[in-house]
Image (cartoon, rainbow, N blue to C red):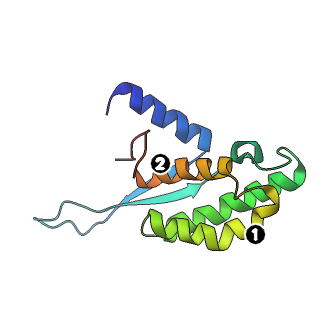
Amino acid sequence: MTNKKRNELSHIKRLAGIQINEAIDPRIHQNVHYKKQVVVSAITLSSDDWQLYNGGSEESEKAARDINSMLVGILNSAHNRKQAQRANDKFIAPKYVKFGYDDTEPRQVLDEVFDIIYGEGSRWGSLD
Protein backbone atom coordinates (compact mmCIF):
# COMPACT_ATOMS: atom_id res chain seq x y z
CA MET A 1 0.00 0.00 0.00
CA THR A 2 1.40 3.38 -0.96
CA ASN A 3 1.80 6.20 1.55
CA LYS A 4 -0.91 8.16 -0.27
CA LYS A 5 -3.40 5.28 0.08
CA ARG A 6 -2.37 4.77 3.73
CA ASN A 7 -3.02 8.47 4.42
CA GLU A 8 -6.39 8.33 2.63
CA LEU A 9 -7.36 5.26 4.66
CA SER A 10 -6.37 7.00 7.90
CA HIS A 11 -8.39 10.05 6.86
CA ILE A 12 -11.56 8.07 6.15
CA LYS A 13 -11.20 6.16 9.43
CA ARG A 14 -10.89 9.45 11.32
CA LEU A 15 -13.84 10.92 9.40
CA ALA A 16 -15.96 7.88 10.18
CA GLY A 17 -14.87 7.92 13.82
CA ILE A 18 -14.24 4.20 13.65
CA GLN A 19 -12.10 2.70 16.38
CA ILE A 20 -10.92 -0.82 15.65
CA ASN A 21 -9.43 -3.50 17.91
CA GLU A 22 -7.86 -6.55 16.32
CA ALA A 23 -7.86 -9.89 18.16
CA ILE A 24 -5.64 -12.70 16.94
CA ASP A 25 -6.85 -16.27 17.28
CA PRO A 26 -4.51 -17.88 19.86
CA ARG A 27 -4.68 -21.31 18.19
CA ILE A 28 -1.74 -20.86 15.88
CA HIS A 29 -0.69 -24.11 14.23
CA GLN A 30 2.38 -24.94 12.18
CA ASN A 31 0.45 -24.86 8.88
CA VAL A 32 -2.08 -22.21 9.87
CA HIS A 33 -0.82 -18.66 10.18
CA TYR A 34 -3.54 -16.86 12.10
CA LYS A 35 -7.04 -15.59 11.87
CA LYS A 36 -7.63 -11.89 12.34
CA GLN A 37 -10.95 -10.84 13.76
CA VAL A 38 -11.97 -7.20 13.50
CA VAL A 39 -13.99 -5.91 16.42
CA VAL A 40 -15.57 -2.52 15.88
CA SER A 41 -15.66 -0.80 19.24
CA ALA A 42 -17.37 2.43 18.18
CA ILE A 43 -18.72 4.44 15.26
CA THR A 44 -19.22 8.13 15.97
CA LEU A 45 -20.69 9.52 12.76
CA SER A 46 -22.95 12.55 13.23
CA SER A 47 -26.20 13.20 11.39
CA ASP A 48 -24.24 15.55 9.12
CA ASP A 49 -21.68 12.79 8.43
CA TRP A 50 -24.52 10.42 7.52
CA GLN A 51 -26.17 13.26 5.57
CA LEU A 52 -29.52 12.63 7.25
CA TYR A 53 -32.48 14.96 6.81
CA ASN A 54 -32.46 17.88 9.27
CA GLY A 55 -28.78 17.24 9.98
CA GLY A 56 -27.65 18.73 13.25
CA SER A 57 -31.12 18.73 14.82
CA GLU A 58 -31.53 16.96 18.15
CA GLU A 59 -33.81 14.33 16.62
CA SER A 60 -31.48 13.54 13.71
CA GLU A 61 -28.43 13.43 16.04
CA LYS A 62 -30.24 10.84 18.18
CA ALA A 63 -31.04 8.87 15.03
CA ALA A 64 -27.35 9.00 14.01
CA ARG A 65 -26.28 7.72 17.46
CA ASP A 66 -28.85 4.90 17.23
CA ILE A 67 -27.71 4.01 13.68
CA ASN A 68 -24.09 3.97 14.82
CA SER A 69 -24.88 1.72 17.77
CA MET A 70 -26.96 -0.71 15.72
CA LEU A 71 -24.32 -0.76 12.98
CA VAL A 72 -21.57 -1.69 15.48
CA GLY A 73 -23.69 -4.66 16.55
CA ILE A 74 -24.25 -5.71 12.95
CA LEU A 75 -20.58 -5.36 11.98
CA ASN A 76 -19.48 -7.42 14.98
CA SER A 77 -21.93 -10.23 14.25
CA ALA A 78 -21.94 -10.38 10.43
CA HIS A 79 -19.46 -12.76 8.80
CA ASN A 80 -19.19 -10.78 5.58
CA ARG A 81 -20.30 -7.65 3.77
CA LYS A 82 -23.39 -9.31 2.29
CA GLN A 83 -24.69 -10.36 5.72
CA ALA A 84 -24.00 -6.89 7.11
CA GLN A 85 -25.86 -5.28 4.20
CA ARG A 86 -28.86 -7.59 4.66
CA ALA A 87 -29.00 -6.89 8.39
CA ASN A 88 -28.76 -3.14 7.74
CA ASP A 89 -31.55 -3.34 5.16
CA LYS A 90 -33.75 -5.36 7.53
CA PHE A 91 -33.15 -3.69 10.89
CA ILE A 92 -31.77 -0.16 10.40
CA ALA A 93 -32.99 1.19 7.05
CA PRO A 94 -36.75 0.73 7.64
CA LYS A 95 -36.54 2.36 11.06
CA TYR A 96 -34.81 5.53 9.81
CA VAL A 97 -36.53 6.15 6.46
CA LYS A 98 -37.98 9.42 7.73
CA PHE A 99 -34.42 10.69 8.21
CA GLY A 100 -33.47 9.78 4.63
CA TYR A 101 -31.21 6.90 5.71
CA ASP A 102 -32.24 4.95 2.61
CA ASP A 103 -31.20 7.80 0.27
CA THR A 104 -28.11 7.70 -1.93
CA GLU A 105 -25.83 9.80 0.30
CA PRO A 106 -26.19 7.75 3.52
CA ARG A 107 -25.79 4.56 1.45
CA GLN A 108 -22.50 5.91 0.09
CA VAL A 109 -21.32 6.59 3.65
CA LEU A 110 -22.38 3.06 4.64
CA ASP A 111 -20.47 1.65 1.65
CA GLU A 112 -17.35 3.49 2.84
CA VAL A 113 -17.76 1.99 6.32
CA PHE A 114 -18.17 -1.47 4.77
CA ASP A 115 -15.11 -0.84 2.59
CA ILE A 116 -13.06 -0.01 5.69
CA ILE A 117 -14.20 -3.12 7.54
CA TYR A 118 -14.37 -5.67 4.73
CA GLY A 119 -11.98 -4.15 2.21
CA GLU A 120 -14.06 -5.43 -0.70
CA GLY A 121 -14.11 -2.99 -3.58
CA SER A 122 -12.60 -0.29 -1.42
CA ARG A 123 -10.84 2.57 -3.10
CA TRP A 124 -9.15 3.28 0.26
CA GLY A 125 -7.73 -0.20 0.85
CA SER A 126 -8.56 -2.73 3.53
CA LEU A 127 -7.51 -2.99 7.16
CA ASP A 128 -4.86 -5.59 6.29
Q: Position of residue 23 (x, y in %)?
A: 39, 60
Q: Nearer the viewer, residue 54 or 32?
A: 54
Outermost residue, bottom side: 90
Outermost residue, front side: 104
Which residue: 62% across, 53% down?
Answer: 107
| Amino acid type, callout 1 | Lys
Is 85 left, or right, of 4 in this rendering? right
Q: Position of residue 88 (x, y in %)?
A: 61, 67
Outermost residue, right side: 58
Which residue: 76% across, 48% down?
Answer: 47
Residue 95 is labelled as 1
Residue 25 visible in this rendered orientation of the protein: yes
Q: Secondary structure at mark 1?
A: helix
Which residue: 33% across, 28% down?
Answer: 2
Q: Nearer the viewer, residue 110 or 62?
A: 110
Q: Quadrant of residue 26?
A: bottom left
Task: Write down the residue under mark 2.
Answer: 116
Q: Nearer the viewer, residue 92 or 42?
A: 92
Is 51 left, or right, of 77 in this rendering? right
Is 32 left, or right, of 4 in this rendering? left
Q: Position of residue 128 (x, y in %)?
A: 34, 47
Q: Is residue 56 above or below residue 29?
A: above
- Disc 2 crowd rating (10 Å Cα; few below 14, some 14-19, many 20+) is many
Residue 62 is labelled as none
Q: Secondary structure at mark 2?
A: helix
